[in-house]
Amino acid sequence: MKWYVKLILPALLLVVWEIAAIIINNAFILPRIESVIPVFLTPFADIYGSGSLLYNAWVSIYRVTIGFLIACVIAVPLGIILGRYPFWENFSDGLIQILRPIPPMAWVPLSLAWFGIGLTSIEFIIIIGCIFPILVSTIDGVKRVRKSWLETARIYQANNRQLMTKVVLPAAGPAIWSGLRVGFGIAWMSVVAAEMMPGAVSGLGYLIMYCYTFGQVRIIIAGMIAIGIIGIFMDQFFKFVQRKYFSWEVHDK
């Protein structure tokens, strides 16, 4: 599919948006596109004392990166262990299945009670949101490593470390990376939602809620568009790495 085909629906959405804004004729309900564009043309301009659009976007990216990396450090090694040892997977499966469906924002009251108002609470919401997709995908990827590959490695007298680094991790790599991609998407949604919690003083989520108190719907929509654009770029990065390093999985199947 040509790249420009993907622009058809967004373009139609802009047309519908503009027509609806003209018909409604109320900027508080739905501002026109021409009032939102200047927000992007002045990304360094301070917005009602809350910082610029670019600054708040950078803060959100920083927070989600930290939380995502912490989740990876926890989930990937744990997933490898659980995937390699069925006893421990069965032992922990009940707890994982209970915690996994709980939405990240359901943890907000506990997060505030445990960590108080501030960065730690936000990072906790991010971590709890993305850790389970990464964990489950890692477990699944390790479990799906072909037994014939493991047996062949043992025939050549590979030790446990070589078995892990030369067979298990490369074979499970595509599934792990897919889990990271899904996990980052959830982390990005979680950070924006967490920044709407009491005590947040920066970030795109904070900017949206802050501007709501001023009735600045145009800035709210600009913040939402910024969230979507950043999400697209992040997802494209994961897709690029997947095509570059894990394309063999598709051909292998």
Image (cartoon, rainbow, N blue to C red):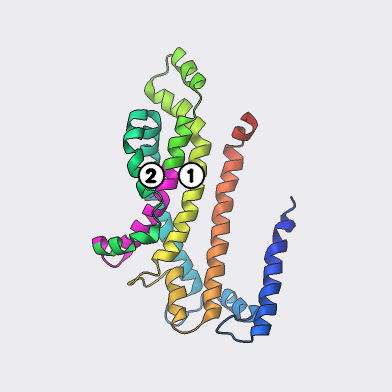
In the rendering, at what x and y percent does residue 178 appear? 52, 43
Segment tinted magenta in the rendering: 114-135
- Pointer 1 local density, CA inside 10 Å: few below 14, some 14–19, many at least 20: many
Disc 1 vs disc 2: which is toward the camera? 2
- Pointer 2 local density, CA inside 10 Å: few below 14, some 14–19, many at least 20: few
In the rendering, at what x and y percent does residue 128 appear? 37, 53
Q: Is residue 82 left or right of residue 183?
A: left
Residue 97: give its label. 2
In the rendering, at what x and y percent does residue 157 appear? 42, 14
Question: Magenta: predominant secondary structure element?
Answer: helix
| Residue farthest bottom in this picture | 25
Q: Indicate the quadrant where residue 199 lies.
A: bottom left
User: Mark 2 belongs to which amino acid?
Assistant: Gln
Position of the C terminus, as image quadrant, is top right
Q: Earlier in the sequence, mark 1 or mark 2?
A: 2
Q: Which residue is mark 1?
A: 179
